[in-house]
Image (spheres, rainbow, N blue to C red):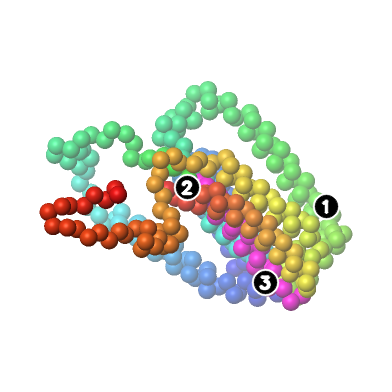
Amino acid sequence: MLSEFLQNYFSIIIFLFIAMGLSVGFIFLNFLLSPKKPDPEKLSAFESGFEAFGDSRMEFDVRFYLVAILFIIFDLEIAFLFPWAISLGKIGLLGFWSMMIFLFILTIGFIYEWKKGALDWD
Amino acid sequence: MIAHSIFFYFFSIIAVFSAIMVIASQNTVHSVFFLILDFISISCLFIMIGAEFLGMIMLIVYVGAVAVLFLFVVMMLNVAQQKDEWFKGKFFTSHIPFGTLISIIIFLELIIVIGGWKYKPNLIETSSIQIDNNFTNTHALGNVIYTDYIHLFQLAGLILLVAMIGAIVLTYRKREGVKRQSYFRQVSREKAEGVTLVDVKSNKGVNLND
């Protein structure tokens, strides 16, 4: 029963291997075919340009983190909706209303963050 | 069956290798990428044992959201500066006993879990949850979460609410001196409050302050 179920994933496995082969192949071809003429001048600043003052990897704004956390929470809400939608016919009114209360609780949070302005970028 | 074992070992080797690389890699961003690879291979293993829903949720939540969160945390820290401090000197070695203690505790817990399945083979019959092979496991979850386990489900909703409000309270700062657009005020502006029609007499000019 289990192997029959896994056979449905066969095309995904083929897809996975083609994707891996392509990505590894491109990197390998690039490594193999690219001209390699290292020169210290290639790494220096162009003509009268400045030397870099700091690191090019800037620290991120904390607002990205807030958006990501809010995204995770609604992501989990959606994850709860999948099994509910599938077995809605079986779980009856109680199941329906328990999800409605769940959604209501999260909508309170959504209204809070909207009114607080956490979704505004500037 | 042989293909099953080949794929099992393929994904487990990737999982173990990337788990080792998460802690062995000196570049924090590379560690997070190895963590993502670990999540993906673990979710493939979940799908292989038939826990399809768990594997897909693992992909959506962990790879899609938690890994992004980790990347943001890593990029919010000043990685280049702290890297040298982390891997050299006292700061690095002082974490070793603590980490070892936690690893030993997790290892013992794993022994308890696996030992339970090994030495009590009828563990699955003694648990109160009946496993019915006629359902997919998404169906099986949906049939019980929202009715039999309604209190835990509502508790999950409350925890999500607390997490949302907590994240906003901790990280949200009101920015002063930022000019925002108010779409409602823009759209609801009338001609009367924005436009004044003035008869300009020749050579007199206009004084708008009247």
- Give, as a three-letter code, the residue at label 1: Tyr
Q: Residue A85 carries which label?
A: 3
To the question of a shared chain for discs 3 and 2, the answer is yes
Q: Nearer the viewer, mark 3 or mark 1?
A: 3
Characterize the local packing of mark 3: few (<14), some (14-19) or many (20 or more) Cα atoms within 10 angstroms.
few
Characterize the local packing of mark 1: few (<14), some (14-19) or many (20 or more) Cα atoms within 10 angstroms.
few
**Which residue sits at x=60%, y=51%?**
A112
A122 inside magenta stretch: no
Q: How many angstroms separate mark 3 from mark 2 (CA)?
A: 31 Å
Q: Which mark is residue B119?
A: 1
Mark count: 3
Q: In which quarter of the image is residue A60?
A: top left
Is any part of residue B72 visible from this angle?
no
Q: Is label 3 in contact with label 2 (beta carbons under 8 Å)?
A: no
**Which residue sits at x=53%, y=22%?**
B90
**Sequence-wise first label, 3 or 2:** 2
Q: Which of marks 2 and 1 is in front?
A: 2
**Which residue sits at x=38%, y=40%?**
A58
Q: Mark 1 lies on which chain?
A: B
User: Which residues are the magenta region?
Assistant: A64-90
Q: Is residue A59 left or right of residue B154?
A: left
Q: Is residue B110 left or right of residue A50?
A: right
To the question of a shared chain for discs 2 and 1, the answer is no
Q: Is residue A100 left or right of residue A58?
A: right
Identify whether B65 is placed above or below B190.
Answer: above
Characterize the local packing of mark 2: few (<14), some (14-19) or many (20 or more) Cα atoms within 10 angstroms.
some
**Which residue sits at x=44%, y=65%?**
A19
To the question of a shared chain for discs 3 and 1, the answer is no
Q: What element carries label 1?
A: helix
A85 inside magenta stretch: yes
Is any part of residue A106 visible from this angle?
yes
